[in-house]
Image (cartoon, grey):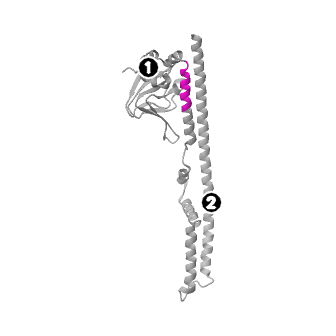
Amino acid sequence: MPIDPAFLKSVPLFQLFDDDELKDLAAEIDEKNYVSGQMIFKAGDPGGDMHVVLSGKVETYILDEEGHRVVLAEVESGDMFGELSLLDSEPRSASAVAVQSARTCVVDRDDLKHLFARKPHAALDILAVLSRRLRRTDRMLSQRVARNPNTVIEEKLTWSDRIADGVARFGGSWKFINTFTVVMLGWMALNMWGMAHPFDEPPFIGLNLILSMLAALQAPVIMMSQNRQDSKDRVRADLDYQVNLKAELEIMELHQKVDKMKEDMLELLVRLKDGH
């Protein structure tokens, strides 16, 4: 089925083309069809071409360090994907899969040279698209956290750590203060007025012994919990460092790719101009 030149007119990359040029381009571009769930390409595959979605929906994604899928974009009719590999001839940096039955047209490097020869300003359209992708990736990297610190801390807890944290939470709450106040008042009232033969007469030596034992046990448990808090802070600091380092490296790599693509396109435009 031939590609409709009128559809190509709606693609930002080809909006500068007139009707005759669109017809010529439609005759040169290859078309491919994918069923829902079909992999279009994987990260690391050889590049050299890009796709423009004619119909359906395509999802581009990468896998993080834990093997979880991170969706970069959902590409629909009129949008393009795979342009980075087309421009720098490097292996694919992301994977693409058809989430719905999709029909795409494939633009390779020869088609791109043909495009620049006819309309050099189309290079600016590609740079605009790449800039939007770069901004979106920057936002994603700044917002995404490698791992939830609370999850990491929870995984490292031992049963003794859980007991220490539980005792510290209860010992530092109003529930403990109110409960213990009621117990002490009840103890004293029972021994002063409630029993003919009290088991702990004033000055309540038994109660003082219990209070001393409780204080002796509670103090080291609370200190253990405080040490646990220091460990939690170190875990959070380490994870923050990993996220910041990863974001910095990814952004530097993206900027290097964009700079290289700008140089390649300027060089190509100069050669095309000299050729005329």
- Residue kind at label 2, given as amino acid type: Gln
Where residue 93 appears, as percent x and y from the top left, is 52, 31
Q: What element carries label 2?
A: helix
The reply to whether discs 1 and 2 touch (Cβ–Cβ < 8 Å) is no
The residues tagged by marks 1 and 2 sit, at their Cα atoms, a distance apart of: 66 Å
Q: Position of residue 19 (x, y in %)?
A: 45, 17
Which quadrant is home to the N terminus? Answer: top left
Disc 1 crowd, CA 10 A, few/some/many (<14, 14-19, 20+): some
Image location (x, y in percent) of residue 40? 43, 29
Magenta span: 120-132
* Quarter of the figure that contains the C terminus: top right
| Along the line of sight, the residue nearer the viewer: 22 or 187 | 22
Q: For marks 1 and 2, give the one nearer the viewer.
A: 1
Q: In this view, does 264 lie above or below 182?
A: above
Q: Residue 220 carries which label?
A: none
Task: Kindly identify which residue carries mark 2.
Answer: 226
User: Which dot marks residue 29?
Assistant: 1
> Does residue 48 appear anywhere in the picture?
no
Amino acid under disc 1: Ile
Q: Nearer the viewer, residue 144 or 62?
A: 144
| Residue drawn at (57%, 14%) of the image | 272
Residue in view at x 57 percent, y 67 percent: 174
Residue under the image location 50 percent in, 24 percent down: 13
